[in-house]
Image: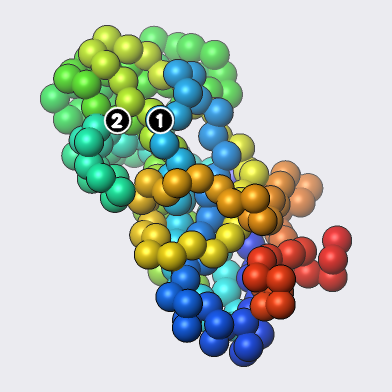
């Protein structure tokens, strides 16, 4: 199973500026969803150090949440084990049950309960602390089926008063996009205090 690693460096001036402005490093993961996502979700958000590491693998979980929960996603149920690609999971009464096979490469869920929100969860280890982040959010009515296709495309930016697994207004235009692959499993980025944004280390 692949393991990915993101290194984020911030100099002293940049760190002081971030804390003075009460900002958090925020990362959003790209997930293709059918039906489309009903909100943009902060996968992880954290107060940074000068040297930071975010690491994750390829295990995904499904979650169900209250549909109208405000900014922070209030999870009411999640799969107890990592879900398998190519299997339809049926949700009812707080339990995800593996069902019939579907297209491999997708993560599928069917809501057999009241209207609520669903999405993928994935644990990220941020500076040594495991954070169970949510990748996306899609509202489903009863008997509706959703298809999720996660990617290793990340958007990195600063945001105020953001929490891990919270709904945010969107990804800002100055966010840094980083694409990971099996060949490119590690990336190094740095914060430019003058520009107020992140960039690839060395300008690549």
The quarter of the image holding the N terminus is: top right
Position above or below: 147 against 70: above
Residue 128 seen in this snapshot: no
Mark 1: few/some/many CA within 10 Å (<14, 14-19, 20+): some
Dot 2 alpha-carbon crowd within 10 angstroms: few under 14, some 14 to 19, many 20 or more: many
Element under disc 2: strand
Mark 1 or 2 closer to N-term? Answer: 1
Tell us which disc is closer to us: 1 or 2. Answer: 1
**Can the viewer see residue 186 in this picture?**
yes
Residue under the point 18% across and 18% down: 113
Residue that numbered label 1 is attached to: 38
Q: Which of 204 and 94 lies nearest the eye of the viewer?
A: 204
Residue 124, position as x, y percentages in the image: 47, 57
> How was this image coloured?
rainbow
Q: Where residue 117 is drawn, which disc sits there?
A: 2
Mark 1 and mark 2 in contact? Answer it, CB < 8 Å.
yes
């Amino acid at each position: 199973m692949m393991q990915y690693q993101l290194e984020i460096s911030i100099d002293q001036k940049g760190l002081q500026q971030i804390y003075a402005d009460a900002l958090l490093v925020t990362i959003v993961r790209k997930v293709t969803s059918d039906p489309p996502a009903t909100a943009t979700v902060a996968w992880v958000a954290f107060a940074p150090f000068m040297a930071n590491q975010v690491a994750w693998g390829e295990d995904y979980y499904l979650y169900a949440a209250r549909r109208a929960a405000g900014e922070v996603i209030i999870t009411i149920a999640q799969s107890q084990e990592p879900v398998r690609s190519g299997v339809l999971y049926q949700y009812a009464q707080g339990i995800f049950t593996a069902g019939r096979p579907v297209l491999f490469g997708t993560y599928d869920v069917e809501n057999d309960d009241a209207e609520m929100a669903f999405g993928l969860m994935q644990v990220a280890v941020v500076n040594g602390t495991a954070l169970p982040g949510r990748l996306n959010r899609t509202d489903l009515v009863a008997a509706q089926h959703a298809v999720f296709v996660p990617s290793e495309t990340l958007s990195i930016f600063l945001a105020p008063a953001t929490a891990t697994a919270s709904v945010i207004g969107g990804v800002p235009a100055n966010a840094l996009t980083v694409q990971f692959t099996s060949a490119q499993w590690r990336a190094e980025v740095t914060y430019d205090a003058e520009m107020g944004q992140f960039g690839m280390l060395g300008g690549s």
